[in-house]
Amino acid sequence: MKTISHWIGGKPVEGVSGNFGPVYNPATGAQEKQVAFASADEVDAAVRAAKEAFRTWGDSSLAKRTSVLFKYRELLDAHREEIAQLITAEHGKVHSDALGEVARGLEIVELACGIPEKLKGELSTQVSTRVDVAAIRQSLGVVAGITPFNFPAMVPMWMFPLAIACGNTFVLKPSEKVPSAAFKLAELAAEAGLPDGVLNVVNGDKVAVDAILAHPDIAAVSFVGSTPIARYIHTTGTANGKRVQALGGAKNHMLVLPDADLDLAADSAINAAYGSAGERCMAISVVVAVGDTADPLIGKIKERADKLRIGPGDDPASEMGPLITKVHRDKVASYVTGAAAQGADVVIDGSGYTVEGYEDGHWMGVSLLDHVTPDMDAYRDEIFGPVLSVVRVETYDEAIALMNNSPWGNGTAIFTRDGGAARRFQMEVEAGMVGVNVPIPVPVGYHSFGGWKDSLFGDHHIYGNDGVHFYTRGKVVTTRWPDPSDGGINLGFPSNH
């Protein structure tokens, strides 16, 4: 059985802890690989390699960094099919979705290629007589990223390309469920000419995570995952003196007003709720239908959902693949049966779905719940699967109150033809990313991604300008070069004259 090892100091490093985790093919349910779990000592070896590499990489020119990143972008583009295949084999998402993930990750590599523009700094001349003030940004040192299973390539690329472009060195701890894509990203970075130790990958479980959070030589940690773990990462990391950005979970609402194009809304609900089997923090999991919108909208959603093709991700005919593990599949299914017990109408029940020839796969069909209320578990919890709930309200004001009462504030959307209503919504809704007739408002690479409330712990969103600020720290330099005629002693407080 193939073993996925670590990548430390520019080369593969076999695990020595003796601990391994299984890597499954979700479509078959079979274990096809194993991944080495790092001990605290192995994490320390990666940090030491990164610390040594920072001695030269941190002082390298912007021209050198960008030349590597441009080459890296070319290699990623050339290998996007291979990376997508690795994602499909370990995550289960369909190939087209995996290719889209790689493309969105490439956006941040392209942003990193333009890092000289982002690091220009500011200069004010003659703030006082022959005194200039410059504001500059400098790298932090060794930084780390802890990434989730649902985007094995994209989320790591949200982090390390920008971090290393800013002059830092990086230790990545990918999800142990999907380790191969991150390993391939590191291999290609080395091929692009990234010096040894600038990017390191350590696989593992909570032991590796805690070693990262406690390590005194790691200056900052980026995290994407569930809200409870995000809170733990932020609390523990900051207690150890680290800068932390921890992106948590979500319960994203899609508000549909009576004037909306219901065909567009139904298409969007299908795409946003069931794409990637609902295993994404920007999935729409709740449709809030205003007035008499619910019945016709649900009819259109059901009509489309019944036609979805579910199967192995490497089958071109498949539109949705399996869930990541059997345990997770069973948990998602329990919300459908639980919703029925709590009074919801189960319009579509996907809990018993199987695929012929792949009966042992982690399958879950699409599920649609109607008459869901805020006290039900299906509404309150982040399900992270292909389950869409419909909540019925009478007015816009009732809808906005419902949405703003949610503890999460990641993404949201409104569907309407009324520009005034849309503008009011984007100002009033308490969420970090808003779509107007756009169901999954993930920002492009030069804007930043992040939510509000329990969807984000820390002060910085990820990538974009916020990402540059997170991976650098500001310094202000005040300079005076006196003329030869200057001199004398003055014990008074300096003034701006």
Image: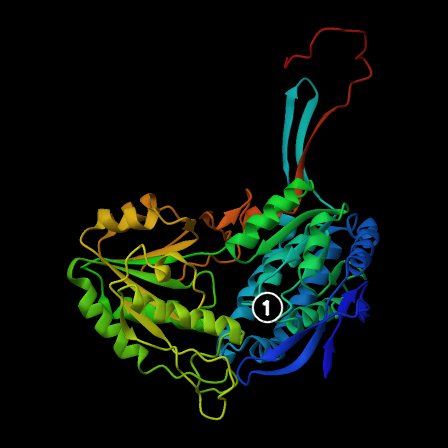
Q: Nearer the viewer, residue 436 or 241?
A: 241
Q: Nearer the viewer, residue 46 or 259?
A: 46
User: On the rendered structure, is 428 left or right of 492?
Assistant: left
The percent position of residue 318, horizontal first and vertical second, equals 44, 84
Q: Is residue 467 visible?
A: no
- Note whether 493 is above or below 5 in the view shown: above
> Quadrant location of the N terminus?
bottom right
Give the residue furthest to the bottom.
357
Image quadrant containing the C terminus: top right
Q: Is residue 28 visible?
A: yes
Q: Is residue 409 left or right of residue 426?
A: right
The x and y percentages for residue 149 are 57, 67
User: What colour scheme governs how the chains and residues are painted in the rendered image of this protein?
Assistant: rainbow
Residue at the (40%, 83%) spot, across then down: 353
The residue under the point 69% across, 12% down is 494
Amino acid bearing label 1:
Pro
The residue at the point 24 percent across, 70 percent down is 298
Dot 1, crowdedness within 10 Å: few (<14), some or many (≥20)?
Answer: many
Q: Position of residue 342 (x, y in %)?
A: 30, 63
Q: Secondary structure at mark 1?
A: loop
**Residue 138, image quadrant:** top right
* Residue underneath mark 1: 152
